[in-house]
Image: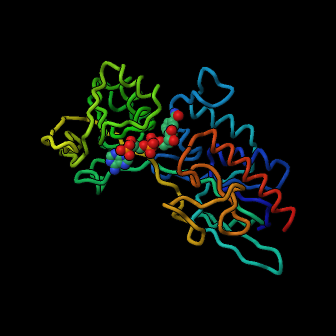
Amino acid sequence: METGDVIIIGSGPAAYTCAIYLKGRSVLLIEGGYVGNNGPGGQLTTTTTVDNYPCFPDGISGPDLVDLMVEHAAVATVSETASALTWRDNDDARVFEVVTEKGVHRARCVVIATGSAAKRLYVPGTHDNEFWNRGVSSCAVCDGWAFRDKVCCVIGGGDSAMEETTYIASIARAVYLVHRSEAFRARADMFARVQRLKNVTILTCRELVRATGTDKLEAIVLASTAGEEEIVIAVDGLFFGIGHVPNTSFLTEIDLSEGHVVTNAKMETSVRGVFACGDVQDKKYRQANTAAATGCIAALTAIDYCANH
Ligand code: NDP
C-alpha cells in the first residue's frame, strides 16, 4: 500500500477541520466505529442543538453540523477503527503504520483526533451492564424515544447532564436530575433552563449506589453525601451525564496524562511526526470550537513537518 502524507484518526470537528487545512495533500481519514455511544462523527452526533458554534445564531443540530463538516472536508475516508499505531525509521524518513480491523495504512505523519466517550458509573446493577440498554444509557438523544411518558433519572452536574435532562424531559413524564454536591459546573443558562422545566426534580448531594429490577431497570437507590438516609426511586430510565474519557486505549507509546494525549501548543506529541487535536488532548475546554481550532493547528504543524522531513 502506498505511503500518504497524513493519516487523520477520528471524525469530529478536530479531524474534519484538520482535513480542510490539508486539502490538496495525500490524506486519509480513518473515521472509527462505535466507542461508547459515539460512532463516526463523534460526540456531536449525539448532541441536540449546538448554539455556540459561529455562523449558526439560531443553533444547528449536532448531526447536521457534522454533515456540513464532512461535505466541506471532502477527504478520502475509510470506515475502520484504529487498533495500533507504530512507526519505523528508514534512513532519515519515518513511516507510520496505523493498523485497523481491515489492514494497515501508511503515512509520513499522523494526527490523532479520536475524541472521548461518555463515562458510566459501575455500581451493583450497572457494573456488568445488567440493565445496559434495558433502562440504563448515556445518551438521551440515542435512546430517549423508549421513555415516552416514563420516569427517568439523569446523573451529573455539568453541561452533558443538562443536555440529557433537557432532552429526556421533553419525552418522559418525570425526570430526576441527581448530582453528588450542591455546586453545578454546568453553563449557567443551561442549568437555569433545567430549573425551569416543570417535570424535572433536582436532587443534590445524592450518589447512585445501586440499580435494581428484574428484566429491566425498575428502581435506583441513592445514598446521601450530606448524612441523610438512603432513598429508593422507581425509574424506567437512568442516563449518565458524568463526563467523558479520552479514546486513547490504542496508543501505547505516546505520552498520556490522565488518559489524554500530551501535546504542546503546536499540537506535537511526545513522538516526532504524531500530532493530536480535539478532546483527546483537551482536559479543560472540550468544545466543538476548541476542537476545530486545535485541528487547524495540528494541520499547519503537520504541513511544516512534511516540508522538513
Ligand atoms: P464535566 O466533567 O463538565 O461534568 C461531569 C459532571 O459529572 C460533574 O458535575 C461531576 O461532578 C459529575 N461526575 C463525575 N464523575 C462522577 C461520579 N463518579 N459520580 C457522580 N457524578 C460524577 O463533563 P461534561 O461531559 O458535562 O462536559 C465536558 C465538557 O464538554 C465541558 O467543557 C462542557 O462545557 C462541554 N459540553 C458542552 C456542551 C454544550 O455546549 N452544548 C454539551 C456537553 C458538554 P462534580 O461537579 O462534583 O465533579
Q: Position of residue 33 (x, y in %)?
A: 55, 52
Above-or-below relation of 58 to 268: above
Residue 46 can be seen in this image = no
Q: Quadrant of ligand 1?
A: top left
141 sits left or right of 279 in the view: left
Q: How is the image coloured?
A: rainbow
Asked which quadrant contains residue 199, the reply is top left
Q: Residue at x 54, y 61 (%)?
A: 248
Depth check, front residue: 180 or 78: 180
Tell me: residue 90, above or below residue 135: below
Residue at 26% across, 30% down? 151
Question: Is residue 202 shown left or right of residue 293?
Answer: left
Q: Quadrant of the N terminus?
A: bottom right
Nearer to me, 163 or 102: 163
Asked whether residue 278 appears in the rendered view, the answer is yes
Residue 302: image x %, image y %?
77, 58
- Residue at horizontal 65 percent and vertical 47 percent from the top: 14
Image spot of residue 105 (x, y percent)? 70, 65
